[in-house]
């Protein structure tokens, strides 16, 4: 019985922390780090300030947790026939998740802000670069890349281009998924041997197909213009 009570308490703590993180993501996405108020986060999460401070020491600590979620919570790469396809899928899945995952959107907004030294915004960029590089290294080991390709360079290029396309898409109202699709379609011929490049899926909706087996998330109007994609990285 005591073990059951302990487990129940731990489960509630996990749910409370998640609720606080998601509420913080909403507020950070709407207002940015500087204008966000802990009182608004507490109200939206429907928790006490004591509960918030039990899990997070400060607004900076909370913002850092939201930022870190961008890489920590990315979906594991689904094994594919080609490692180059896994490289594509990382960005396409993240583009898709930005449409409906508020934690990813809040994290993305915080990552691109440049109005102070805190919190640390470098970790997501480096995390995505390292992940992309590791996948391209595996692709090269499997003979999928052109001989001259150094995996680290294209990885930085794709992560940086994703960030820029995210900002541009939000500003101009473009469909980010289509822009990221065009990015991979343009870049891959200079990285991947033709026989592999011709078999890769870079079409819009690839992220949803990987995660859900369909072009949209279940129960989500992912094409709705009311779900803007904020600035961030991928």
Image: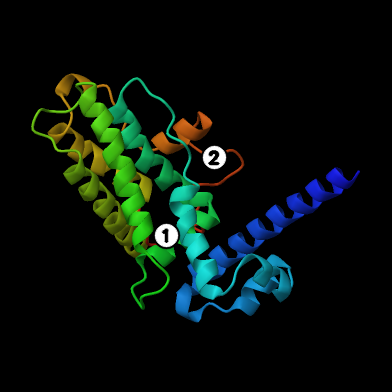
Front-lying residue, 196 or 68: 68
Q: Secondary structure at mark 1?
A: helix
Left or right position of 89 against 7: left
Sequence order check, earlier mark of 2 and 1 = 1
**Residue at 34% from the left image edge and 20% from the top image edge:** 81
Label disc, if present, on residue 131 of the rendered structure: none
In the image, residue 62 lies at what x, y percent? 55, 67
Q: Secondary structure at mark 2?
A: loop
In the image, residue 104 lies at what x, y percent? 48, 54
Left or right position of 38 against 77: right
Front-lying residue, 180 or 131: 131
Taking the view exactly as shown, the residue that stands out farthest to the front is 2
Residue 107 visible somewhere in the drawing: yes
Tell me: residue 167, above or below residue 143: below
Front-lying residue, 224 or 126: 126
**Residue at 52% from the left image edge and 61% from the top image edge:** 65
In the image, residue 228 lies at what x, y percent? 46, 59
Residue that numbered label 2 is attached to? 217
Q: CA distance from mark 2 to mark 1?
A: 20 Å
**Residue at 28% from the left image edge and 50% from the top image edge:** 159
Instruction: Give the quarter of the figure containing the N terminus.
Output: top right
Give the quarter of the image for residue 231: bottom left
Q: Assess disc 1: are there few (<14), some (14-19) or many (≥20) residues with their C-alpha within 10 Å of its C-alpha.
A: many
Residue that numbered label 1 is attached to? 108
Front-lying residue, 164 or 137: 137
């Amino acid at each position: 019985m005591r073990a059951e009570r302990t487990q129940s308490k731990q489960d509630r703590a996990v749910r409370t922390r998640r609720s606080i993180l998601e509420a913080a993501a909403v507020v950070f996405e709407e207002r940015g780090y500087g204008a966000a108020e802990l009182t608004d986060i507490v109200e939206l999460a429907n928790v006490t300030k004591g509960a918030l401070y039990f899990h997070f020491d400060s607004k900076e600590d909370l913002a850092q947790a939201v930022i870190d979620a961008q890489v920590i919570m990315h979906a594991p790469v689904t094994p594919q026939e080609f490692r180059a396809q896994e490289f594509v899928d990382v960005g396409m899945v993240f583009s898709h998740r930005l449409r409906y995952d508020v934690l990813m959107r809040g994290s993305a907004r915080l990552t691109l802000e440049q109005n102070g030294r805190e919190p640390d915004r470098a970790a997501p960029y480096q995390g995505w670069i390292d992940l992309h590089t590791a996948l391209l290294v595996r692709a090269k080991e499997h003979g999928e890349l052109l001989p001259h390709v150094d995996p680290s360079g294209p990885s930085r290029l794709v992560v940086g281009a994703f960030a820029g396309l995210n900002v541009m898409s939000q500003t101009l109202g473009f469909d980010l998924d289509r822009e990221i699709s065009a990015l991979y379609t343009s870049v891959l011929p200079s990285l991947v041997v033709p026989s592999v490049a011709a078999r890769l899926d870079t079409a819009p909706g690839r992220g949803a197909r990987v995660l859900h087996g369909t072009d949209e998330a279940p129960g989500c109007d992912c094409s709705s213009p009311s779900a803007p994609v904020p600035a961030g990285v991928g």
